[in-house]
Image: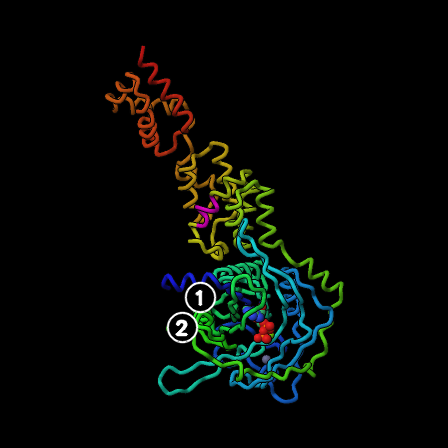
Amino acid sequence: MGAPHESAARGYEPVIGLEVHCQLLTRSKIFCSCSTAFGAPPNSQVCPVCLGHPGVLPVLNRRAVELAVVLGLALGSKIREVSVFARKNYFYPDLPKGYQISQYDLPLCDGGSLQIGTGDARRTIGITRLHLEEDAGKMKHAEDGSGRSLVDLNRCGVPLIEIVTEPDLRTPEEAHDFLERLKQLVQYIGVCDGNMEGGSLRCDANVSVRPRGSEALGTKTEIKNLNSFRNVQRALEHEIRRQIAVLESAGRVEGATLLWDATRDRLQVMRTKEEAHDYRYFPEPDLLPLVLAEEWIAAIRGMVPELPEARRARFVREYALPEYDAGVLTATRELAGFYEAAARRSGDAKLASNWVMTELLGAVKGDTERLRNLPLTPERLGDLLALITSGAISGKIAKAVFEEMAVSGGEPGAIIEACGLSQIVDPDAIRALIAEVLAANAPQVVDYLAGHERVLPHFIGQVMKASRGRANPELTNRLLREALEARRE
Ligand code: ADP
Ligand code: ZN
Ligand code: MG
């Protein structure tokens, strides 16, 4: 982007709203008992209901409603006691019924919000609504030049929740941050696996620009085919630049649906406003309105776990952790749970935080899902840390023990015993090591006696080396000074 363009861009404010689809973690589909398991052979998980044969009737999956309500409550939405399913009619080969069962004017949840940013830059993004719907199948376009396409209907009828935001986001980075937070939330509360590349989290982005200071919204375009958070951000950057250029040249932005082409790094027009679909929504005649009793909603409220934001604040309060630590440790539910168990057991919350953030995250290469398969338990890590606090082992030895524990899951006391790693606290043993070191470093001893205290660390290093890191550092320091002073006489 050249300099003149940049100054023009400063005169405009982007406005962004997202529509996010999350695949709910149910075992069966939303209106039939077919499996939702991913990766089965094409068209092996279908039945007359999800294929839309004439005369069949859908039956609503209770678990899908529960998960949707959990998410609604976590976002602070109002749960509607009576919501209505509606038919959204359109033709496409991945939709054998010719319509999708969704919700329209009476969605399951209204309103709500999600926080983005941190510290002073924290912002609240409004949620317009959440509704339940079924997924469509998946087209596979042959790449052999034949122009043929195949369709896999296993995904037909998989339960989705659609989350629509208010046009509250202002930059592509904010849109990215929103998606990160939403993904964290849905994973935390266990309603969706949050895998965008695998298609269980999908997003369409709506964007317009307006002169800075103006209240009125500009004409928006909608971007589809965004299969990663990075692509959402890239596509928005492109589209914002394009819209500003149109306005700068006194043109008008046309309402349109655009497709992001990630391989060519560009947008293409899918359809213009004139070609927009009329879905002819009407209430689904085969399903009764969904009526949720107040007590049922209250019971679901009890199933919502502590949310990441609340947990982060509690970690700062309860364990006196820095904000930074609390943010890292509450990134996923697995990590936060591991940390809390280790901290309680060790009795030193800050030490536990340091170890979990560096050693533990290092051992799983930053992927907290791997914690599930790690042989090391949080209790054993806590025990190891308690050994450092009590002075039984040094931090350096503890690292070696940790490495072993991460592989074998062994008990720290047993590993220390087996490897002969316990700290040397016997003064006579340390004195013997000091005597050896001083004998081997006669010139430095002369330096010390001439008043050059700076050689002390050198001696301590040598004693540590001779003890393979096992000598107690404080004791070594004291005995070393004694031994040196004794040579003055
Ligand atoms: P549509 O009628 O095209 O479905 P909606 O009003 O339902 O549009 O909004 C869909 C999404 O687009 C929402 O996330 C909303 O916040 C966002 N949106 C609506 N108007 C604008 C606008 N002028 N600029 C940017 N985003 C917008
Ligand atoms: Zn089915
Ligand atoms: Mg709409």
- Relative placement, left or right, of 310 versus 464 is right
Q: Counting residues from the N terminus, which is met first, the one under dot 2 or under dot 1?
A: 1
> Residue shown at 56%/46% (left/top)?
341
Relative placement, left or right, of 49 versus 329 is right
Q: Which residue is mark 1?
A: 237
Q: Quadrant of the C terminus?
A: top left
The part of the chain drawn in magenta is: 355-361
Where is residue 462, by image quadrant?
Answer: top left
Along the line of sight, which residue is nearer the eye, 131 or 299?
131
Which part of the image, by quadrant, shows the N terminus? bottom left
Which residue type does callout 1 highlight?
Glu
Viewer-side residue, 340 vs 250: 250
Magenta stretch holds residue 360: yes
> Residue under circle 2?
266
Mark 2 burial class by Cα count in 10 Å: few <14, some 14-19, many 20+: some
User: What's the magenta bit mostly, secondary-structure-wise?
Assistant: helix
The correct choice, above or below, for 443 with respect to 225 in the image is above
